[in-house]
Image: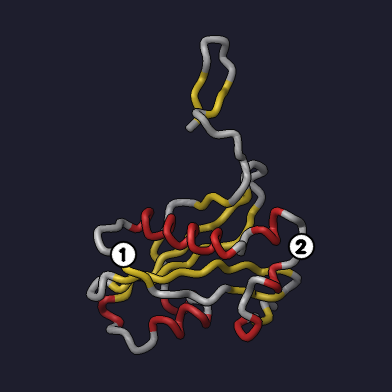
């Protein structure tokens, strides 16, 4: 958290790592906008119990656009899955979503859990190191963005 000192200097509360990804507040997403990987993950589940959400992702500290986080929540099963999606060199890349329990979580907590899972896998390191997302994305799910 940012605080301000008496000298009007902005300081971080115990954190000096300004790297990673942050995202906008999640908004509901229509099924037709879901990436193929997310559509496959929710197939076979009761469509009346599935809520889809999307958020724009940005790199810290530059605020440069860094893709999207897409999440599906199965309200009946109390499970969620999510993916990271980015258009890079005119190709729409996405990770494979994996279902996990989201009992007692709100949408923000679900997004945080999806981000933590992706971060643990090293998905965002390509962006921070100036590489390509190909090594972390599902090659079968890359689609032309044109």
Image spot of residue 64 (x, y percent): 66, 50
Left or right side of 107 for 9:
right
Q: Earlier in the sequence, mark 1 or mark 2?
A: 1
Q: Element at badge 1?
A: loop
Callouts 1 and 2 close, C-beta under 8 Å: no
Which residue corresponds to the image point at 74% horizontal and 55% vertical from the top-left? 129
Picture quadrant of residue 57:
bottom right
Q: Residue 119 at what x, y percent from top left? A: 55, 59
For the view shown, which residue lies furthest in the bottom direction? 44
Q: Position of residue 58 (x, y in %)?
A: 59, 52
The one nearer the camera, 52 or 119, is 119
* Residue identifier under label 2: 131
**Dot 1 corresponds to which residue?**
102
Locate residue 94: give its quadrant.
Answer: bottom right
Q: Residue at x 53, y 77 (%)?
A: 96
Query: In the picture shown, does residue 22 fall above or below 139?
Result: above
Note whether 75 is above or below 144 in the view shown: above
| Residue at the outermost top position | 7
In the rendered picture of this protein, how many numbered marks are placed on residues? 2
Vertical relation: 15 (above or below) 22:
above
Q: Looking at the figure, which quarter contains the C terminus?
A: bottom right
The structure residue drawn at horizontal position 68% and vertical position 81%, both measured from the top left corner, is 144
Q: Is residue 10 above or below residue 85?
A: above
Q: Helix or strand or loop: what does disc 2 sit on?
A: loop
| Measured Cα–Cα span from mark 1 to mark 2 | 32 Å
Q: Position of residue 131 (x, y in %)?
A: 76, 62
Identify the mark at residue 69; answer none if there is no mark: none
Identify the residue at image location x=69%, y=76%: 91
Q: Few, some or many C-alpha atoms within 10 Å of disc 1 (few <14, some 14-19, many ≥20)?
A: some
Q: Judge by depth and name the residue closer to the eye, 37 or 145.
A: 37
């Amino acid at each position: 958290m940012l605080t301000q000192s008496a000298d009007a200097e902005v300081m971080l509360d115990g954190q000096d790592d300004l790297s990673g990804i942050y995202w906008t507040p999640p908004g509901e997403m229509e099924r037709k906008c879901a990436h193929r990987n997310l559509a496959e993950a929710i197939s076979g589940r009761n469509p009346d119990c599935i809520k889809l959400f999307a958020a724009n992702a940005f790199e810290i500290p530059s605020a440069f656009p860094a893709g999207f986080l897409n999440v599906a929540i199965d309200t009946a099963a109390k499970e969620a899955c999510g993916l990271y999606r980015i258009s890079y060199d005119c190709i729409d890349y996405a990770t494979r979503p994996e279902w996990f329990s989201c009992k007692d979580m709100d949408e923000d907590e679900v997004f945080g859990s999806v981000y933590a899972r992706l971060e643990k896998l090293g998905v965002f390191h390509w962006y921070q190191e100036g590489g390509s997302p190909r090594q972390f994305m599902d090659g079968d799910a890359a689609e032309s963005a044109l």
